[in-house]
Image (cartoon, rainbow, N blue to C red):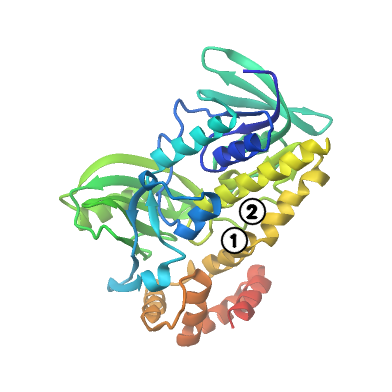
Amino acid sequence: MKSHYDLLVIGGGPPGGALAAKTAAENGLSVCLIEKRPAIGVPLRCAEGGIGEDMIHEFFDELDTKWVSAQIRQAVIVAPPDNRKVVLDSAVTRKEVGYVLDRKVFDRDLIAMAAGAGAEIYVKTRAVDAIITDGVVQGARVWHDGGGEQDIYASVVIAADGVESKFARWCGINSTVPMRELETCAQYLMTNIDINADETVIYLGNDIAPGGYVWIFPKGEGTANVGIGIMGSRSGEGCRARDYLDAFVREKFSEGKKMELIMGGVSVCKPPLECTVADGLLIVGDAARLSDPMTGGGIYHAMYTGRLAAEVATAAIRQEDCSKACLMSYDTTWRNAALGRELARNYRMKEFFITLDDEVLNAVLNSVKNLQVTEFSVLQIIREIVKLHPDVRKELTSLIKYNSKGREELKSLIKYLQ
C-alpha cells in the first residue's frame, strides 16, 4: 500500500465504492479502495431486489446472468386489514421491478472490475480518522490487518462507507439520522417456502410492520429473502424488527427453513445531507443518505452517485483544483437529475403515507386495481390514486391544516400530483 494516490475510496460497499474505483481507474487515476470487512459483499446488507433491466444497462453493456437470482414478472401489494392483493404485472412494472440480484456475486464482480481497471483493493483495512489540513480533506489514517496504522494521502477522498458512515462526520459533516427517519431492518434467507419464483410481494400494515413493510424477494424455487423494515421510533423492547419478522414468518411460512439472518438500518430521511461535498471530499450512496425514502432501495442510487463522483473527481484532479467549489458539480448534478427529484418527491409521499391508519391505507391501495397506467412508477400510481380516491386529497388537506411544519411541502405535493 502506497502513501499517496489520486483517489482514495473509503468503503468497498458495492456498488457505490466499487463503481467509483472502477470509473476512476479507467480514467487513468491511481486509486486505492479500502474495505473494513475481510471480504467484499459479505455479510450481505441488502434485500437484493428492485433493479430493472434498463438500470443495469445504464452501467453495463450486458447483463451477466450469474448476477441474477430471479427475474421478476409481477409485483404484489398486500393491503391491510383484509389482506386483499393488488397485482401489478410486467406490462406496468417493467421499469420498477426486474431482477433480484445475487449481491454476493454481483459485488465481487464489481470489485474485480475495479481491480482489473487498475485500482488497488485492500480488505480488513478501515479508516480510523480523516487527515485534514487547513479545512481540506487530504486522506485518511487507516488500520490494516497485519500492517498497523498508516496515513494515506489523496487528492480526493470518496466516502462510500454506508449508512453507518463515520468518515463524513470526521470531516465535520453532520450525517446524523433521526430515529423517526431510520428504518430498522431484519431479513431471513429462507427455503422450503411456498412462493411464486417470479413475483415480489410487499405486505403493508401497522400491525405487521409499523411505518414500513414486509418484503418477499424470490431467489429461486422455494427460496426467498423474507425481510422487514420498521420505523426506528416505533422499535422497542418486544417490538423490534426481528420480533415482527418472526411473527410474520410463524404465520406465513411455519414450515420454512432459515438459512441466514441479517440485520441493519436504512435511512429514509429528507434527502440527503445538506451538502455531499467538501474540500477534497465527495460522499456517495447510503453514506450520503441517498436511499429511497419510500422503499429504502439504494442500489441504483449508489451506482449512479459512485460513477458520477469518480467522473467529477477525475476532472478536478486534472485541473489540479479539488476545492469544494470545483467538486460542487457532483452535488448539483445529482440533485437536479431525476434521482434527486425523485428522492425529494418520495420523501413527501412517505411522510403522507405513514400518517394513514390501516383502514384508509387499505382503501387507498385497493384503488390501485382500477388504475389506468402506462408504466409503473411511484408518481404515476399516487397520481391515479388521488384521482380515484377523494379521501386521499382530504387527508392531505387535513395534514396541511394541522401540520404547519410540513405545510409547504404538502401543498407542493398536492399541486405536483394534480
Percent x, y of residue 313: 72, 40
Quarter of the rendering occupied by the N terminus: top right
Percent x, y of residue 111: 50, 34
Quadrant of the rendered image containing residue 287: top right
Q: Is disc 1 surrounded by few (<14), some (14 to 19) or many (20+) residues within 10 Å?
A: many
Mark 2–mark 1 contact, CB under 8 Å? yes
> Circle 1 is placed at which residue position?
343
In this picture, residue 371 sits left or right of residue 116: left
Q: Secondary structure at mark 1?
A: helix
Q: In the image shown, does 149 or 90 lie closer to the viewer?
A: 90
Q: Identify the residue at the far left of this view.
A: 255
Q: Amino acid at mark 2?
A: Pro
Residue drawn at 46 percent across, 78 percent down: 374
* Residue 118 vertical placement versus 74 (above, below): above
Q: Amino acid at mark 1?
A: Leu
Q: In the image shown, does 13 or 391 lie closer to the viewer?
A: 13
Q: Secondary structure at mark 2?
A: loop
Residue drawn at 62 percent across, 15 percent down: 149
Nearer-N-terminus badge (2/1): 2
> Circle 2 is placed at which residue position?
272
Quadrant of the rendered image containing residue 202: bottom left
Residue drawn at 43 percent across, 57 percent down: 50
Q: CA distance from mark 2 to mark 1?
A: 8 Å
Q: Identify the residue at the far front of this view.
A: 61
